[in-house]
Amino acid sequence: MSLKAMVFIDGAWLYRSRSSIFAKLGEEHGCEIDYAKLPRVFCEDVANFLDEDVGLVRTNYFGTIPSVRSSFSSSKQRSFYDFLEKSCGYEMEIHEVDVSGNEGRDESWVKVALASSLMFNSAMPGAFDVAILIGDDTDYAPALRRARMFGRRIQLVTAHAAGGVQPATGTSLIWKSHVSDFPPLYIDDHAEEVRLVRENIMRTCKQCGREEETTWAGPEFFCSECRSKRTIRVS
């Protein structure tokens, strides 16, 4: 019987860490991540390390979205979260945060939600064998240690700092004791694997029914003509 892996993604950390992927690829203006492939890449790494079959049972994504912000439209962010859920099969935990005058609250909520989910699932018999944490923050150390007390094994996924060096002491979980069971993985070491390569496909417009060639693989597609008629109103 294969081992069960559950992935926990700190969305705020992943967003910040994209720069390490861009740097590894030499992409000055950035590139896109293949979010459907991302959790499977690290499951395969764990399987290769253990020389055992490892099956992905769930990918949990934790993020926030502004509920109040002057002259800000969250429609693009909501579409992205919808894409992760419907097209990539992620379990989403998204919290609306009033960011006006509350810098840092959004990331604090992500940490609390992820740690709570990790503890809940660790206490559920048979839920998973290996937790893969994509998010390097020392605040997770207590939850990781307690998950290991439940008999769960932990795989950390971090990112190299500028210049390809390891994260500084005191800023990364890799320097904490009793928080993981495997050597850390670095997301930028897998830059080529997690880079999204788009292919042209024919899609039917949700609004007018016309077919058009596109690279967009999201759940809803609108042709170029219909998109030009759509306007985003910002209140």
Image (cartoon, helix red, strand yellow):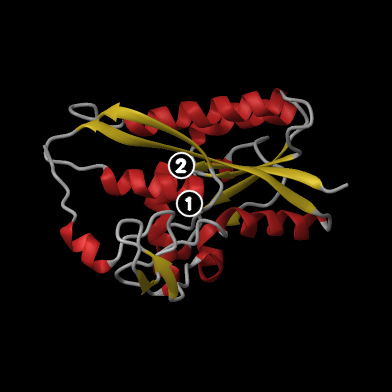
Residue at numbered disc 2: 171
Other residues around mark 1 within 10 Å, as few (<14) / some (14–19) / many (≥20): some
Secondary element type, mark 1: loop
The x, y position of residue 180, in whole percent, is: 67, 41
Report if residue 168 is visible in the image. Answer: no
Q: Residue at x 29, y 69 (%)?
A: 29
Q: Residue at x 69, y 28 (%)?
A: 122
Q: Residue at x 18, y 28 (%)?
A: 100
19 or 230, which is in the foreground?
A: 230
Horizontal side of residue 221 vs 141, given as left or right = left
Q: Amino acid at mark 2?
A: Thr
Q: How many marks?
A: 2
The x, y position of residue 19, in whole percent, is: 37, 60
Q: Amino acid at mark 1?
A: Pro
Q: Badges 1 and 2: C-beta atoms under 8 Å apart? A: yes
The x, y position of residue 4, in whole percent, is: 76, 43
Q: In 3D space, how far apart are the residues under numbered discs 1 and 2 (Cα atoms)?
A: 7 Å
Q: Could you say which disc has been placed on residue 135 in the image?
A: none
Residue at numbered disc 1: 167
The x, y position of residue 33, in whole percent, is: 45, 61
Secondary element type, mark 2: loop
Report if residue 52 is visible in the image. Answer: yes
Horizontal side of residue 132 vs 181, given as left or right = left
Other residues around mark 2 within 10 Å, as few (<14) / some (14–19) / many (≥20): few
List the single residue furthest toward the front.
209
Q: Residue at x 48, y 51 (%)?
A: 167
Q: Quadrant of the C terminus?
A: top left
18 or 84, which is in the foreground?
A: 84
Q: Is residue 171 above or below residue 102?
A: below
